[in-house]
Image: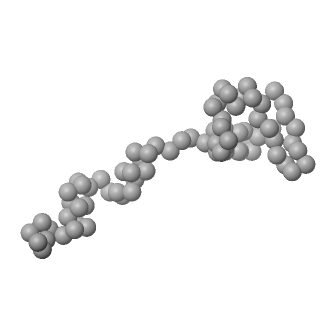
Amino acid sequence: MKTVVSEQGQISVPKVIRDRLALKPGTELEMEVVTGGLMVRKKAARSRWKDVFGALGKAERSDKIVEELRGKPDAVVR
């Protein structure tokens, strides 16, 4: 398949490819110059679990993290 670069430097992805790769408006694509051409690929989706666990930084127990944030249970004023 071929496409043409517009005067604004834009290209259109043929519908057959959009459908096959489930490209919707707003889908991010990565471009890379390779020998003899250009490689375009759909950006890998980030895992929501990785986002959550990545925010924790180290692999610490959750009760230790909560204790660091709130203080020791016996130090809580009621």
Q: Furthest residue to the front?
A: 78
| Number of numbered callouts drawn | 0
Q: Does residue 4 appear left or right of residue 25 in this picture?
A: right
Left or right, residue 47 beside residue 53: right
Q: Position of residue 52 (x, y in %)?
A: 39, 51
Placement of 36 over or under 60, stated as above or below: above
The front one of 9 and 60 is: 9
Colour pattern of the rendering: one colour
Q: Residue at x 24, y 55 (%)?
A: 62
Query: In the image shown, does 77 or 35 lie closer to the viewer?
Result: 77
**Residue placed furthest toward the left:** 74
The single residue placed furthest to the right in the displayed view is 7
Where residue 45 appears, as percent x and y from the top left, is 54, 41
Could you tell me which residue is drawn at 87 percent across and 42 percent down?
A: 5
Name the residue nearer the viewer: 73 or 30: 73
Point out the image quarter for the N terminus.
top right
Residue 70 in view, yes or no: yes
Q: Position of residue 7 (x, y in %)?
A: 91, 48
Against 64, residue 44 (above or below) is above
Q: Position of residue 21 (x, y in %)?
A: 64, 30
Residue 58 lies in what quarter of the image?
Answer: bottom left
Name the quadrant of the C terminus.
bottom left
Which quadrant holds residue 61? bottom left
Specify whether 19 is left or right of 54: right
> Hey, which quadrant is residue 26 in on the image?
top right
Where is 77 relative to 16, above or below?
below
Q: Does the image show residue 37? A: no
